[in-house]
Amino acid sequence: MKLLLDVYKGAAKDLRDKVELLASEKALKEEIDSIKTRVEGLEQELEKHKGAMADEEAIRRLKMAEETIENLQKNLAATKQEEAALLAEMEFTGQEYEEMQEQNVRLLQQLREKDDANLKLMSERIKSNQIQKQIREEKDVLADHVTSLNGYREAQCQLVKKQEERERALQNAVTAMEKELNLRQQTMDLHKRKAVESAQNAQDLKIRLDALQQQLQEAQDGLNEKTRCVEEEAFRAKRVQEECVSLKRKLEKQKKIDLYGAADEVLLEEVRQYKARLTCPCCNTRKKDAILTKCFHVFCYECLKTRYDTRQRKCPNLSATRPLVPTTSTKCTYDR
């Protein structure tokens, strides 16, 4: 049955139509048999009711039954004709079906033979794949070996090139050293000549140096005497200046005594002058506590700050254009 189902699935559309016709023919045969049984039953009923029915209704029913019988006979003839045609077609399809079965058997044998051949080919292919895999592995190993040999050969070639370059460099260095040696020998000869000349010049210069040293010693002695004289004169001038200053102070003191008459008044006037020196010349109230770094004049910090804020950059004592940089000082200094 499985084989028949496979054959049916692999059959063409015409064969499937023929199988459907066979099924429909079988159904028609069953229907004809049922119709025949019904006709026989109606005939039996007609024979039973022939004697009992004499009236018109019975005759009418009989006519209707006869008409139905005729129709059924016509249908039976048509069905018989269809049955004959279907039988002929069934015989034809049966022959074709047998031929197809034979053909399927032959095809199945061919398929089995092809499967055997495919199995053999698959086994041979597997073997060939294994052999090919081994060959590829050997090829990869040989390729790696070849690459390593090529790398070793390239390294050896590079070493040879480096050795050749080194040999050339050494040859060039040897030639350069020979040239340099020749030049050095020439320069040595020149230096020897120059050394002899310089030795002679040195002797001459030594003689000149001794003469110059003697002259220098004489000049230094004269200079020392002159400086001694100048220092004595400067000391005398300083003593004279000090005496002049002391005399001026005495004169001023005498003038003050003459002006004020008493020593207390003189002292008070000196104290007032000293206080005036200690107070700021701008405001005359605050003490001096800041100094200008350019001219070193002393003022109070508030006056300098106000002048700096108002951008008055001139010193009040000098009236010169100097930048005011006030710096606080704990020690007051007098004006110059």
Image (cartoon, rainbow, N blue to C red):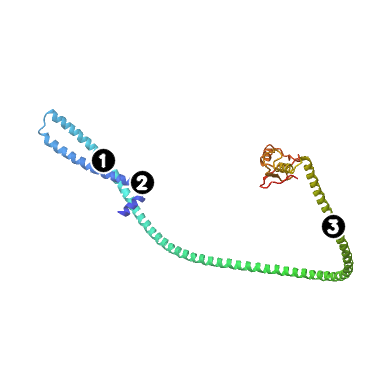
| Front tag of 3 and 2 | 3
Residue nearest the observer in this picture, 174 or 31: 174
Mark identifier at residue 232: 3
Work out which quarter of the rendered image holds the N terminus and state it: bottom left
| Front tag of 2 and 1 | 2
How crowded is the residue under tag 2: few (<14 C-alpha within 10 Å), some, or many (20+)? few
Residue nearest the observer in this picture, 306 or 289: 289
Where residue 270 sits: x, y (%)?
73, 43
Q: What residue did someone put label 1 on?
A: 79
Work out how far the residue at label 1 is from the one at label 3, CA to CA, in angstroms: 180 Å
Q: Secondary structure at mark 1?
A: helix
- At x 16% / y 39%, what residue is drawn? 41
Question: Which is more N-terminal, label 1 or label 2?
Answer: 2
Where, by quadrant of the figure, is residue 201 drawn? bottom right
Q: Secondary structure at mark 3?
A: helix
Work out which quarter of the rendered image holds the C terminus and state it: top right
Question: Which is more N-terminal, label 2 or label 3?
Answer: 2
Where, by quadrant of the figure, is residue 73 drawn? top left
Above or below, comparing residue 47 to residue 23 in the picture:
above
Whether label 1 touches label 3, CB < 8 Å? no
Amino acid found under the numbered disc labelled 1: Thr
Where residue 75 sits: x, y (%)?
24, 37
Whether residue 172 sits left or right of residue 216 in the image: it is left
Mark identifier at residue 65: none
Work out how far the residue at label 3 is from the one at label 2, CA to CA, in angstroms: 159 Å
Whether label 3 touches label 2, CB < 8 Å? no
Amino acid found under the numbered disc labelled 3: Glu
